[in-house]
Image (cartoon, rainbow, N blue to C red):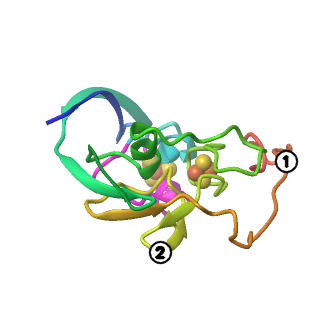
């Protein structure tokens, strides 16, 4: 079994949580029962009630297919992490290639074809038997985003 060293996991500090549910209704988490450590809920909490902890963890392996090539990768990680594990290179944002611009599910710059549908690799848990197609050049964009720009309500910016 491979060891995922110092994996980030997020827990709720109940002394700070105000039960607003922002982290569940606005933030998107595709793995609520098992934290994958991609931290979108951590960054979304307006009361800083989400706490990051790092722990070593032994995990089993799962089989995935990337562009029809079979790989074994650790379970309990995102598709983006699994792709990097097998050598796939995300480019820097702005080049028109898949990138990890936000890593929290907000920008879709990391989206690839997962089991036949366009989906964000940075927030999708890797699952045994999953098929990932990295060729997305011919897909019609739903919107064009050229880069971040400030807005008046706080936060960092609109996404890439
Ligand atoms: S967003 Fe923060 S304060 Fe609100 S329910 Fe989630 S953890 Fe609690
Ligand atoms: S990097 Fe995945 S949605 Fe932004």
The part of the image, by quadrant, that contains residue 63 is bottom left
Query: Considering depth in this image, is 94 or 138 the residue closer to the camera?
Result: 138
With respect to residue 7, does 59 lie above or below? below
Determine crowd level at label 1: few under 14, some 14-19, many 20+ residues with C-alpha closer than 10 A.
few
Q: Is residue 59 left or right of residue 98?
A: left
Q: Pick out the residue farthest to the front.
A: 69
Q: Residue at x 37, y 37 (%)?
A: 15
Give the labeled residue for mark 1: 151
* Secondary structure under the numbered disc 1 in the rendered image: loop
Specify whether tag 2 is near ligand 2 (CB below 8 Å): no
| Secondary structure character of the magenta stretch overall | loop
Closer to the chain start, of discs 2 and 1, is 2
Q: Are marks 2 and 1 in contact (CB under 8 Å)?
A: no
Q: Residue at x 44, y 46 (%)?
A: 83
User: How many tags in the picture?
Assistant: 2
With respect to residue 149, does 52 lie above or below? above
Query: Considering depth in this image, is 63 or 77 the residue closer to the camera?
Result: 63
- Magenta span: 17-36
Q: Is residue 21 magenta?
A: yes
Q: Residue at x 18, y 40 (%)?
A: 59
Give the labeled residue for mark 2: 116
Q: Residue at x 69, y 63 (%)?
A: 137
* Secondary structure under the numbered disc 2 in the rendered image: loop
Determine crowd level at label 2: few under 14, some 14-19, many 20+ residues with C-alpha closer than 10 A.
few
């Amino acid at each position: 079994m491979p060891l995922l060293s110092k994996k980030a996991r997020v827990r709720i500090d109940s002394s700070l949580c105000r039960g607003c549910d922002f982290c569940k209704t606005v933030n998107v988490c595709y793995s609520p029962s098992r934290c994958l450590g991609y931290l979108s809920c951590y960054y979304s909490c307006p009361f800083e009630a989400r706490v990051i902890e790092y722990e070593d963890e032994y995990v089993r392996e799962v089989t995935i297919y990337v562009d029809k090539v079979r790989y074994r990768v650790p379970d309990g990680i995102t598709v983006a992490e699994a792709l990097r594990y097998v050598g796939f290179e995300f480019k820097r944002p702005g080049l028109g290639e898949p990138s990890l611009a936000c890593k929290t599910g907000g920008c879709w710059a990391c989206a690839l074809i997962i089991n036949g549908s366009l989906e964000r690799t940075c927030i999708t848990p890797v699952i045994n038997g999953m098929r990932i197609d990295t060729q997305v050049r011919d897909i019609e964009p739903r919107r064009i985003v050229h880069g971040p720009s400030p807005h008046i309500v706080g936060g960092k910016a609109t996404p890439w």
